[in-house]
Amino acid sequence: MQTGLYEDLWALDPWWGMPGMTNLANLCHAPKIADSSGIPPGIPGIAARNCPELILADNVPLVAPRPTPPRPTPFTHQFLWFILLRSVKSFFPILAPNAFASSTTKFQIATKIKRKTRLAYKMKKPKQKTKLATLVDCQREISVMVERSKTRLIAPTLTLGLLQSYTSNKQTVFSERETQAAYSNAVKYLQEFMGHGLHIGAKWEDAYSRRTLPKYQVLKPLESGYELLAPYTTFSGQLIPWIENTIRKYIGSKLGDIPRLEDKQFRAKLATNREAFLLLLKQNIELNPANFEFICFAVLRVHLEKFACKIYRDSRASAHDKGVDISTNFGVVYQIKKLRVVNQKTCDAIVSELQANFDRQRLEDGNVILVIDDIHKEFREFLINMKIQSISKFELMKLAQQYDDEEDREKVLRIIHDEFRREYASVIK
């Protein structure tokens, strides 16, 4: 069987018939002159006998009818994949495209293309930060440092120490040792300034001067040290008192009256007044999850010790400890969460988390107790059916209200302060 012209054209140019593509097939869509050899001009090597649609005539232009494009074959899809991957080969050199790969391999290659494109986008040179020029710019950067701080204020404290060193001796270039000394001096100064050492004074790390402060345009790394940049040096006189007050205000908002509990006389005086004692607990338990956990632990510990039961905090506040915030010597564990259970979705999430963190036998024995901010009655009953007991903040405050002995109230206050000191006390004395 002889092969027709259009089949031959398709073999020579697989892109034939694709919209907007210039190919050999377009030669059949324009007037052609068939000479005596029977070969249409522009189509060398293809005999006219393979073109049944063309009728030879002397100097008569004949128009070949537009054929119906052939149905794509499996080879067509493979060829298109090959062209697509080859077009991006220079941009993705690790890819080795296989035109005859299976559909799974094609999907994997396409996934690699997406990932590499995303990676190339991320690797673009980041935009340069706006250069600081005014006092407001410096204050804005320091405010961001404070907001991003978690357990201790490190970057603002180091900035304060460097500015204090600059003010005293106009030093702008610091070695690593001098930077660390400036940080230690600032920590000691703030401890005296605020009257306590909570939330400041973390252990020194080289990353503070190498990466943290350069990110806020405070320091510029040099070959053998760091340079304190303007406009921090220009406005050092205004920035030093502003940083001091900002740090004190921020820590005060997180701690409330907790630092005052370090004074034994204050604790003893507060324990004599039940209403003042309860008011301090209610005001400070609402501040943040750490306060909630410490106060709950103190109230529970004083209550259980009356029954010769001991409880322990096995983890740090907000740690990923698989739910065991408080353990006991009688097989029960407490998980403390500062949240309100007001819908079924939250309740289901709690149950799923408990089932993932605790073994089935412990849950079935009812040895897991949940301490939370608040819970609706219907969801409390749901948890009871799942063998999970719950204690709300209201019930804890009601339990603290039953402490008639001043010694018990004073002990609650002491435990609260001890836990804060264990968690957030400065390591620099």
Image (tube, rainbow, N blue to C red):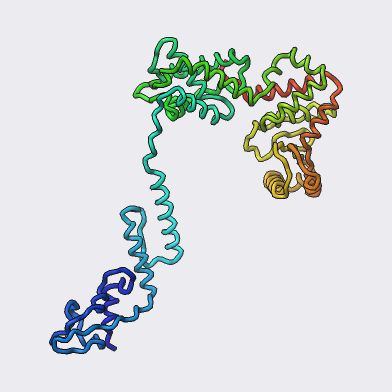
| Residue at the image position 45 percent from the left and 28 percent from the top | 216
Nearest the eye: 393 or 236: 236
Residue 188 is situated, as x and y percent measured from the top left of the image, at 55, 14
Residue that lies at the very extreme toward the top in this rendered image:
168
Examine the rendering and report whether any part of residue 364 can be seen.
Answer: no
Vertical comparison of 97 with 348: above or below: below
Quarter the N terminus occupies: bottom left
Vertical comparison of 386 with 194: above or below: below
From the viewer's perspective, tell me whether residue 37 is left or right of residue 240: left
From the viewer's perspective, tell me whether residue 77 is left or right of residue 55: right
From the viewer's perspective, tell me whether residue 119 is left or right of residue 58: right
Residue 308 is situated, as x and y percent measured from the top left of the image, at 83, 28
Q: Quadrant of residue 245?
A: top right
| Residue at the image position 38 percent from the left and 25 percent from the top | 221
Examine the rendering and report whether any part of residue 349 can be seen.
Answer: yes
Nearest the eye: 292 or 248: 248
Q: Quadrant of residue 298?
A: top right
Q: Quadrant of residue 35?
A: bottom left
Question: In the rendered picture of this protein, how many numbered marks are placed on residues?
Answer: 0
Quarter the C terminus occupies: top right
Vertical comparison of 195 with 416: above or below: above
Nearest the eye: 367 or 132: 132
| Residue at the image position 66 percent from the left and 31 percent from the top | 288
Residue 268 is situated, as x and y percent measured from the top left of the image, at 78, 15
Residue 16 is situated, as x and y percent measured from the top left of the image, at 30, 73
From the viewer's perspective, tell me whether residue 31 is left or right of residue 371: left
